[in-house]
Amino acid sequence: MTTMTQIPRQDSLENHTPSRRRSALRFVGHYVEMVIAMIVGELLFAGVWNTASVILGEPAFLTRPDVDSLMMATNMSLGMAIWMRVRGHAWPGIAEMSAAMYVPFLVLFPALWTGALSASDFMMWGHMLMLVAMLLVMLRRRTEYAGSHHEHGHGRAKAVATAAPETTPASTGRRVLTELKHRWPTGLALLMTIDLWVQPAVPPAWTLLVLPGAYLLIGAVRRTLTGSRDLAIQLGGLLAYLALAAVAMSVDPGLTPYLVAAGWLLHAVWDVVHHRTGKVVPRGYAEWCTVFDVAIGATILLAVAW
């Protein structure tokens, strides 16, 4: 009896290779996203810890390397958990990735406490092992991380779409969370300025130029400055803030904080107008900028009053 060996078709192999390449690129892209979310989480939530330490009167407590490492791991875990949930990952995967932030530092605690590792070496090795731990978690769920974001959230979205409407307190809570999700620019701005309410400060007068400059840069990148009128308005704003910054730097130092505060608060009005019209910048940015500018202006006045 003759046995026939089936030879894979060439076109099947050629179609399979791009698919594997796409999966590999998605996996690498997910890893990069995790690292970025980790860094963003550290930058955003660090102010919360600093504020809490000042309120409790224990600012030196956070300088201990073991405490500092756990604080950073928490910040990074929060940043990644939020991003992973937005991307549709399930809670078990989020828990595993969060554990990858803590375990590397925990296993190094004995070496730190016994003096085998200095504080700087402890931090260096902890962060290096953290990157490795993240990779191991992703390899454990390689199918999930090599797939598209649409596939992650498809099941959860389908379940929500097919679920019957509810009027229970739980459904009310979900509606509140949904509304808070839509207001994320406001929450982000409040989070970024939380420490200023406890330790208010006066930024240099030249920082006023960042406000109109950001609008011009975003408008140029998004190509929303198409009309001469829009461009003229933005350039006019830049010239006005150039003049305000020049005056703030040349007047009596006692008046400078008030001029700087006025510049930030007036720009909040500029933000509201752009949020209403939807021109030049995204509405989310205009919302974030409104709250951020008001917080900066208000805390400058607090710094002067204190």
Image (cartoon, rainbow, N blue to C red):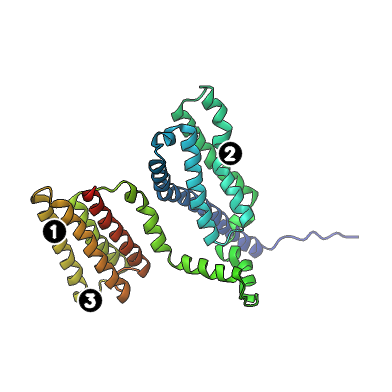
Mark identifier at residue 103? 2
Asked whether the residues under the numbered discs 1 and 2 touch, taking CB atoms below 8 Å apart as contact, a structural biologist would say no
Residue 300 seen in the current view: yes
The image shows a total of numbered marks equal to 3
* Residue 182, percent from left and from top: 45, 68
* Residue 78, percent from left and from top: 50, 51
- Say which element carries label 3: loop
Q: Which residue appears farthest toward the right when viewing the image?
A: 1
Q: Nearer the viewer, mark 1 or mark 3?
A: 1
Q: CA distance from mark 2 to mark 3?
A: 55 Å
Q: Nearer the viewer, mark 1 or mark 2?
A: 1
Residues packed near mark 1 inside 10 Å, few (<14), some (14 to 19) or many (20 plus): some
Residue 103 vertical position relative to residue 1 in the rendered view, above or below: above
Front-most of 179 and 40?
179
Mark 3 sits on what residue? 227
Residue kind at label 1, given as amino acid type: Leu
Residue kind at label 2, given as amino acid type: Val
Q: CA distance from mark 1 to mark 3?
A: 26 Å
Residues packed near mark 2 inside 10 Å, few (<14), some (14 to 19) or many (20 plus): some
* Residue 66, percent from left and from top: 50, 33
Front-most of 37 and 246?
246
N-term-proximal mark, 1 vs 2: 2
Mark 1 sits on what residue? 244
Look at the image and tell me in which quarter the N terminus lies: bottom right
Residue 135 seen in the current view: no
- Say which element carries label 1: helix
Q: Is residue 47 left or right of residue 294?
A: right
N-term-proximal mark, 2 vs 3: 2
